[in-house]
Amino acid sequence: MNPPPADPLRTTVHWLARHTRFPAFRLEKRAELLLCAAALAAAEDEAGGRRFLVQSRDVAKDAAQRAHAQRRSHAHFKSDNSAKV
């Protein structure tokens, strides 16, 4: 048996031919539209290459950076000599 083609649109047409005897018998127009939209979305994902995942924030790192900035601001405030004339 031949392996299925890699193209999502061809895969969808092969699936339709196997399970619904396409093109002799057709699904409802909305069902075919839904299958084609899913195939196009799969083709777009495949063409896009890798997926970008949303990274969660590192709460400990953020807190450490805020604390460091706070310490720096206090140090600069205490050693501010610009008011002297």
Image (cartoon, helix red, strand yellow):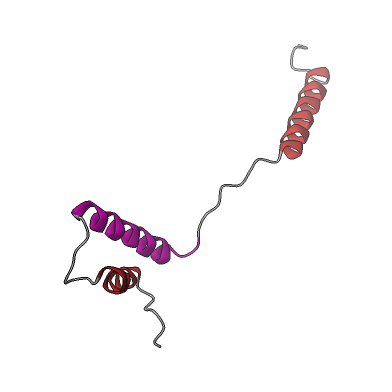
Q: Is residue 39 magenta?
A: yes
Looking at the image, the residue that sits furthest to the bottom is: 1
* Above/below status of 76 relative to 51: above
Residue 17 in the image: state x and y as whole percent: 27, 73
Residue 55 in the image: state x and y as whole percent: 61, 47
Q: Quadrant of residue 19?
A: bottom left
Residue 58 in the image: state x and y as whole percent: 70, 41
| Highlighted magenta segment, given as a residue range | 29-50
* Above/below status of 77 relative to 44: above
In the depicted view, which residue is nearer to us: 72 or 18? Answer: 18
Give the number of callouts.
0
* Above/below status of 63 relative to 32: above
In the displayed structure, does residue 11 sit left or right of residue 49?
Answer: left
User: Which residue is painted at 83% across and 21% down in the image?
Assistant: 79
In the depicted view, which residue is nearer to us: 78 or 65? Answer: 65
User: Which residue is painted at 78% across and 35% down in the image?
Assistant: 64
Q: Quadrant of residue 25?
A: bottom left
- Would you say the magenta stretch is mainly helix, strand or loop? helix
User: Which residue is painted at 78% across and 19% down in the image?
Assistant: 77
* Above/below status of 3 relative to 8: below
Q: Quadrant of the C terminus?
A: top right
Q: Quadrant of the N terminus?
A: bottom left
In the displayed structure, does residue 48 sit left or right of residue 40?
Answer: right
In the displayed structure, does residue 85 sit left or right of residue 21?
Answer: right
User: Which residue is painted at 22% across and 70% down in the image?
Assistant: 22
